[in-house]
Image (cartoon, rainbow, N blue to C red):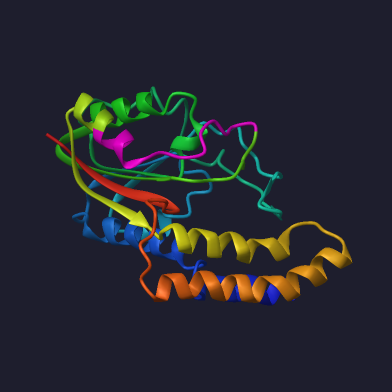
Amino acid sequence: MKAVLKKLRPYVFGGQQVAHRDALVFEFLARQPEGSMLLDAGAGPQRFKPHCKHLRYVSQDFGEYTGGDEFAGESLERWNSRTCDIICDITSIPLETGSQDAIICVEVLEHLPEPARALKEFARLLRSRGRLLVTAPFNSQYHQQPFFFYSGFSSEFYKFHAAAHRLKVMTITPIGDYFATIAQELLRLPFLKSGVLLRLAAAVLLPPAYLYVWLLHALRVPSPSSPLCYVVELEKD
């Protein structure tokens, strides 16, 4: 049953948010001119590399996280980041100033003790008019411990630090809303470790709760500003 639910989750309300986020990353990569220098910062297992065949792709990671913890009741796959091109601190990457045409940093900032320093480093590495795409959660549970320092970032975080480092915010796209986030968390409940009675209770109680949240969304009830994450595109001046 869990295997079936996992396959269905990306296609139902609340479960589509990660696919939406990734689609924006893929679109950003496809927009970059052929032969451009692209840095994948905090690349981990380099899952975006297959989408960068037209680019001069360089991956970076600090290489210490190896996987094995749990996120919302699900075991994370083993995390092989030691094969990245550059193993270093993300706030001090040994590449020349102005050497990168584009940088992506996907779901990394929450794992950095000083995320603003990473934005400063990206600004150093980008050429003039170079583009940076950052995604990070607005509201996240613990994961990849002990390397987890922030549960999320507001849109104001990006605006403030962009201005401090000669970066212009081009777009800030929220992924999902309050209702979609609640729906996603409801979808995660069956994956939590629990006894038979709790699983039976979930089977009875979750469908009406999920339907209620879906109706709020479908009826366009105003949603609080509480997305899953933001996808932010910036340009170096």
The N terminus - image quarter = bottom right
Q: Is residue 213 left or right of residue 80?
A: left
- Which quadrant would residue 114 be assigned to in this image? top left
User: Closer to the camera, 230 or 118?
Assistant: 230
54 up-or-down from 121: above or below: below
Q: Is residue 214 left or right of residue 177?
A: right
The residue stretch that appears in magenta: 146-159
Q: Is residue 104 magenta?
A: no
Q: Is residue 153 magenta?
A: yes
Total numbered badges shown on the rendered structure? 0
Q: Residue at x 87, y 61 (%)?
A: 195
Q: Residue at x 68, y 61 (%)?
A: 189
What is the x, y in percent for residue 105? Answer: 38, 42
196 up-or-down from 33: above or below: below
Q: Residue furthest right?
A: 196
Q: Residue at x 52, y 67 (%)?
A: 15
Q: Is residue 16 left or right of residue 190?
A: left
What is the x, y in percent for residue 144? Answer: 62, 40
Q: Is residue 90 visible?
A: yes
Q: Is residue 165 visible?
A: no
- Which quadrant would residue 158 be assigned to in this image? top left
What is the x, y in percent for residue 4? Answer: 68, 77
What is the x, y in percent for residue 2? Answer: 72, 71
The C terminus - image quarter = top left
